[in-house]
Image (cartoon, grey):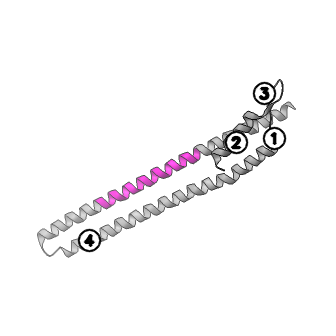
Amino acid sequence: MTIDEILDEIENMLVDSTRVPFTNKLVIEEDDLIRLLDELREVMPQEIKDAAKIVSERQRILEEAQKEAQNIVDQAKVYGTKLTDENIISKQAQEQANEIVLQARKAARDLQNDAITYADDVFTHLENNLKKALEVVQQGHNNLQQNKQNQ
C-alpha cells in the first residue's frame, strides 16, 4: 500500500467514523488507526530508500559524465598530438580538440543539471508526501487528545 493510499484510508476512517453526540469528537477504531499508522511506518522508509537510490543514481550519472568528458579530452589530446607534424593540421586539431572539450563540458553540465533537477523533483514529491502524512497523523493525534480530554 502506498503512502497516499494509507492517508486516504485514514481520511476515510475519520470521515466515516461515528460522532459523539453534542461534541465535535469522533469515535475511531483504535486498532484500525494503529494498523494504518504501522503500515505508514513501513512504507515511509521505502520512500526514503527510493530517494537515496535516486541520489546514488545521480552521483553515478555525474561520475559517468565526468569519465566520458575525460575520455573525450584524452582522445582530443591524442588526436591533437598526432596532427602536430604540420602547422595547419596542428591548428585544425587544436580547434577540434577545443570544440570537443567544450562539447564534453557542456554535455557534463547538462547531465549534472538534469540529475539535480530530477533529484529535486523527487525530494519535493517525497517532502510533500511526508508533510501530508504528518498532517494526517497530527490531526488524528489531536482528535484522540481532544476525545481523551472530553471523557
From the viewer's side, name the closer residue of 14 and 24: 14
Label 2: state its secondary structure.
helix
Q: Residue at x 39, y 64 (%)?
A: 66
Q: Rounded to the nearest whole Å, what is the CA distance between mark 3 and mark 1?
A: 17 Å
- Cβ–Cβ under 8 Å for marks 3 and 4: no
Magenta residues (range): 103-127
Q: Position of residue 118 (x, y in %)?
A: 47, 51
Compared with 120, 139 (above or below) is above
Label 1: state its secondary structure.
loop
Label 4: state its secondary structure.
helix
Sequence-first disc among 3 and 2: 2
Identify the residue under disc 1: 29
User: Which one is in front in this view, the residue at disc 3 or the one at disc 2?
Assistant: 2
- Cβ–Cβ under 8 Å for marks 2 and 1: no
Q: Rounded to the nearest whole Å, what is the CA distance between mark 3 and mark 2?
A: 21 Å
Q: Rounded to the nearest whole Å, what is the CA distance between mark 3 and mark 4?
A: 76 Å
Q: Rounded to the nearest whole Å, what is the CA distance between mark 1 and mark 4?
A: 72 Å
Q: Position of residue 17 (x, y in %)?
A: 78, 34
User: Which one is in front in this view, the residue at disc 4 or the one at disc 2?
Assistant: 2
Amino acid on which disc 2 is placed: Glu
Q: Rounded to the nearest whole Å, what is the CA distance between mark 4 and mark 2?
A: 62 Å
Q: Is residue 150 left or right of residue 92?
A: right
Identify the residue under disc 4: 77
Q: Residue at x 14, y 76 (%)?
A: 85
Amino acid on which disc 3 is placed: Asn
Identify the residue under disc 2: 9
Identify the residue under disc 3: 24
Compared with 136, 63 (above or below) is below
Sequence-first disc among 3 and 1: 3
Sequence-first disc among 3 and 4: 3
